[in-house]
Image (cartoon, rainbow, N blue to C red):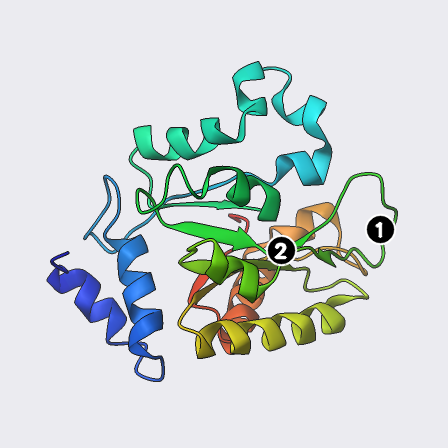
């Protein structure tokens, strides 16, 4: 895989990271239609966990098949595919080496309560991500939640383990809970604050809700 000058310049910003981490970041940044441009698009499929299978997939029954999502990411020319443990396990062998995968290692569900303290449970591990050939782990935090500090501590521990073993780290940083209003969750200054916290926590790739 020949790395473009643009991707090389991005990797140069991660001087504290190991060659293994940089190689996995390069795999993501060089994949798909945007490969080599320094931009990327990730297909995240954790809706079944978050909202339930019927709400997520009934409108398109093909989506009940875990392989459908791997193939969708490939056909669309995307940069990577992110999903929880079970979804990755279902297609890791068949699609090995075809598209970078990101194991989402924490998840929530719509049956749980907790508007003031939204949180997520740890549902995957770095060891499982390595076993299944993932390029990265993915994690969600909710800045503003009464549970935010615990989520940050969990992320930092898992991120350190992942980096030590050569995996990249993706962080979804979504302001939510506490005293935040719904419009406040996507206010420009709040979104920027969430992105800044994610960077300070050591994430390589950061996703925030667009303001």
In space, the residues marked 1 and 2 are separated at their CA atoms by: 14 Å
Tell me the residue at 49%/46% (across/down).
Answer: 82
Q: Which residue is mark 1?
A: 115
Residue 60 in view = no
| Residue bearing the label numbered 2 | 174
The residue drawn where x is 86% and y is 52% is 114
Q: Where residue 66 sits in the image (x, y, percent)? A: 53, 31
Using the image, determine if residue 147 lies above or below residue 186.
below
Instruction: Tell me what residue is drawn at x 75 percent, y 51 percent.
Output: 181
Q: Nearer the viewer, residue 73 or 211?
A: 73
Q: Quadrant of the N terminus?
A: bottom left
Q: Position of residue 4 (x, y in %)?
A: 13, 59
Percent of width and height locating residue 159: 54, 72
- Choose between 173 and 165: the one closer to the eye: 165
Q: Which mark is residue 196?
A: none
Residue 6 lies in quadrant = bottom left
């Amino acid at each position: 895989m020949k790395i473009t000058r643009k991707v090389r310049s991005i990797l140069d910003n991660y001087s504290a990271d190991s060659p293994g981490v940089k190689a996995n970041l390069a795999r993501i940044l060089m994949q798909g239609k945007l490969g080599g441009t320094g931009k990327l698009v990730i297909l995240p499929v954790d809706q079944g966990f978050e909202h339930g299978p019927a709400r997520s997939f009934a409108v398109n029954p093909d989506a009940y098949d875990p392989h459908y999502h791997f193939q969708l990411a490939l056909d669309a020319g995307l940069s990577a595919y992110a999903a929880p443990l079970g979804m990755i396990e279902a297609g890791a062998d068949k699609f090995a080496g075809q598209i970078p995968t990101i194991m989402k290692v924490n998840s929530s569900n719509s049956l749980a309560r907790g508007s003031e303290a939204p949180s997520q449970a740890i549902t995957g591990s770095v060891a499982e991500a390595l076993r299944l050939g993932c390029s990265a782990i993915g994690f969600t935090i909710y800045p503003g939640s009464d549970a935010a500090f615990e989520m940050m501590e969990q992320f930092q521990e898992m991120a350190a383990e992942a980096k030590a073993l050569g995996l990249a780290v993706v962080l979804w940083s979504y302001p939510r809970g506490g005293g935040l209003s719904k419009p406040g969750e996507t206010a420009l200054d709040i979104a920027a604050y969430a992105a800044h916290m994610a960077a300070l926590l050591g994430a390589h790739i950061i996703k925030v809700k667009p303001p």
